[in-house]
Amino acid sequence: MVKGRVQSRAIFADLIDISEGGCKLRGSRGFARIGDRITMKVGGISAPLGKVVWIEDRMAGIAFEGEMHPAILDHLCAANGADIRPEKQRLHRM
């Protein structure tokens, strides 16, 4: 679960996957529109500013304007119990 803001609205969404350049979120229907700017915290860490680039049903693809450092991704995955070995990646780099 991530906490964020789309435009001026607070949102809570499930983080499905994440990479250095973006992520996929699942929220309530209509929680965002293509082109919306989004700020969010993942595991208490601020992600780069993002932009909604696609929506399909309750899923949204977010492209970060900057990049999230690989070490931060590794930390988030380890903190959430993800196995970060390449053959076992789930919540990790795409």
Image: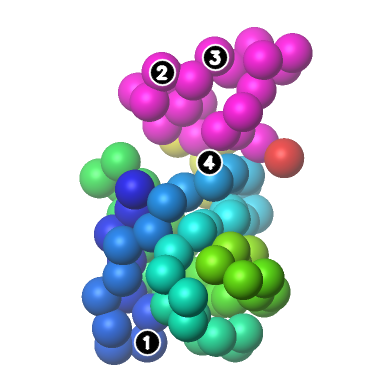
Indicate the amino acid at tag 4.
Answer: His
Crowd tier of the residue under label 2, counting other residues whose Cα lies within 10 Å: few below 14, some 14–19, many 20 or above: few
Residue position marked by numbered label 2 in the rendering: 81
Residue position marked by numbered label 4 in the rendering: 69
> What distance separates the C-alpha of mark 4 from that of mark 2?
19 Å
Callouts 3 and 1 close, C-beta under 8 Å:
no
Where is residue 36 shown, x and y percent of the image? 51, 85
Residue shown at the point (25%, 45%) measured from the top left: 44
Where is residue 55 shown, x and y percent of the image? 65, 74
- Choose the circle earlier in sequence order: 4 or 1: 1
Residue 85 belongs to the span the image colors magenta:
yes
Where is residue 58 shown, x and y percent of the image? 54, 67
Residue 21 seen by the camera: yes
Q: Give the magenta part as a residue range.
A: 73-93
Secondary structure found at label 2: loop
Residue position marked by numbered label 3 in the rendering: 83
Crowd tier of the residue under label 3, counting other residues whose Cα lies within 10 Å: few below 14, some 14–19, many 20 or above: some
Where is residue 67 shown, x and y percent of the image? 58, 54
Q: Between label 4 and label 2, give the one nearer the viewer.
A: 2
Viewer-nearest residue: 87 or 21: 87
Callouts 4 and 2 close, C-beta under 8 Å:
no
Indicate the amino acid at tag 2.
Answer: Gly
Secondary structure found at label 4: loop
> What distance separates the C-alpha of mark 3 from that of mark 4?
18 Å
> What distance separates the C-alpha of mark 2 from that of mark 1?
31 Å
Residue 53 sits in quarter:
bottom right
Residue position marked by numbered label 1 in the rendering: 7
Indicate the amino acid at tag 3.
Answer: Asp
The answer to whether 23 is drawn above or below residue 52 in the figure is above
Residue shown at the point (50%, 34%) measured from the top left: 73
Viewer-nearest residue: 23 or 70: 23
